[in-house]
Amino acid sequence: MIADKMKPMMENSSVIRAMFEEGMKMAAVYGKENVYDFSLGNPNVPAPDCVKEAVLEVLEKEESTFVHGYMPNAGYEDVRAAVADSLNRRFGMDYGPENIIMTVGAASGLNDILKTILNPGEEVITFAPFFVEYASYVKNYDGELVVVPPDTDSFQPDLEAFEERIGNKTRAVIVNNPNNPTGVVYSEETIRRMGEILERKSREIGHPIVLISDEPYRELVYDGAEAPHIPKYYKDTAVVYSYSKSLSLPGERIGYLAIPKSMTDWEQVTAAATIAHRILGSVNAPSLMQRVILRCVDATSDLSVYERNRNLLYGSLKEYGFQCVKPEGAFYLFVKSPVEDEGEFCQVCKKHHILVVPGTSFCCPGYVRISYCVSHEQIERSLPAFRAVAEEYHLL
Ligand code: PLP
């Protein structure tokens, strides 16, 4: 009954989800406060007040047939204009509403742009470790994901290895900055050099390579770090954004795809991406949430909570002897497993009621991901358990 193409996807289906379910079972046995679930990237900071106020205002003041009705597939014109203006103010760009397609979160924006540009057999390059769904999204359009191995000293992209992997079949590159699962922020210099490589290689192979910048964590940066706006450094860049993390709205499924005027054939690309959005079944992004974004376009949740969590968890894990690059963004720590098989390390953590995700899920064995988008109290309560794991491995 199941299509051949679905079978491998079912086999590989999310380890992260399985961990989450495991966490719920453990919570039922040991009590919720005694299980330290760091597996999911589900923000625990509430959405800002302006979201609730906007929902109420929309429902009270805007006409019901308008708010709940069909609309252009790219989304409401005034919402797209507000997003474009916000990007222009922040990054000195020249977006108009015609450059923005409202999407069903970042997942939908990624699928829209991949469906728009990818022919069967063409290659999409990404950097390990990466958000595991990229592999499925590329497969959706019969593309091939080509993975650049990680530089585990810094987790910055290895640009030499990247350049070596670009060939005639390369159609696109996906970068995710700030990064899930490492929390690393790629610097302006890295992005500039990546842009130069892509310009040179696009000329060499005779077609433009599209850089897809997946940025759901753009606002989650610490210590003065900033995620560069990549279209300023490479003209054929499509930006995929989501409000899931910055406004703590993952279940509401709202984001956008921005295609700048610098992109080759941008009008055609935008028209095709709008059709892709429709025929993939999304039709249009959730209407009520679009009306909310119009009112909250520059707002964020209280993101300082994540910085506080990072400081406590990173500082403590280093003190206990674990190895980890200090993250400057997102809400993840990517910690080196004290033993080669990080699956075994995950089991030891589990014995101490700590749930973390193996790096194999991100194409980077030997590491585990810890999501610190949890309550500060959970981190405080979990520290003796982390210390006990460190003692078991004689790290202390
Ligand atoms: N890209 C990355 C790197 C992510 O971490 C996530 C979600 O965690 C997504 C895309 C999907 O985001 P959304 O839930 O907005 O579709």
Image (spheres, rainbow, N blue to C red):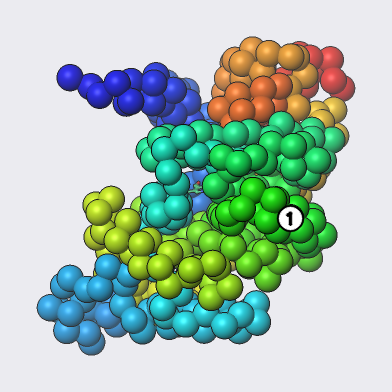
Residue 326 in percent (x, y) is at: 79, 45
Instruction: Answer with left or right where residue 194 lies relative to residue 181.
Output: right
List the single residue furthest toward the left. 65
Q: Quadrant of the N terminus?
A: top left
At 60% from the left edge and 34% from the top edge, which residue is drawn? 146
Q: Is residue 334 visible?
A: no
At 76% from the left edge and 58% from the top edge, which residue is drawn? 196
Q: Amino acid at mark 1?
A: Arg
Residue 347 in percent (x, y) is at: 59, 15
Residue 366 in percent (x, y) is at: 71, 21
Is the residue marked 1 within 8 Å of ligand 1, measured from its CB?
Answer: no
Instruction: Answer with left or right where residue 210 lies relative to residue 286.
Output: right
Q: Secondary structure at mark 1?
A: helix
Where residue 119 sits, quadrant-wise, is top left
Where residue 182 sits, quadrant-wise, is top right
Q: Is residue 242 visible?
A: yes
Q: Is residue 182 above or below residue 43?
A: above
At 32% from the left edge and 56% from the top edge, which residue is drawn? 276
Q: Quadrant of the C terminus?
A: top right
Instruction: Answer with left or right where residue 382 lies relative to residue 69.
Output: right
Q: Which residue is mark 1?
A: 200
Residue 320 in percent (x, y) is at: 82, 29
Q: Is residue 286 above or below residue 346?
A: below
Categorize mark 1 by other alpha carbons within 10 Å: few (<14), some (14-19), many (20+): few
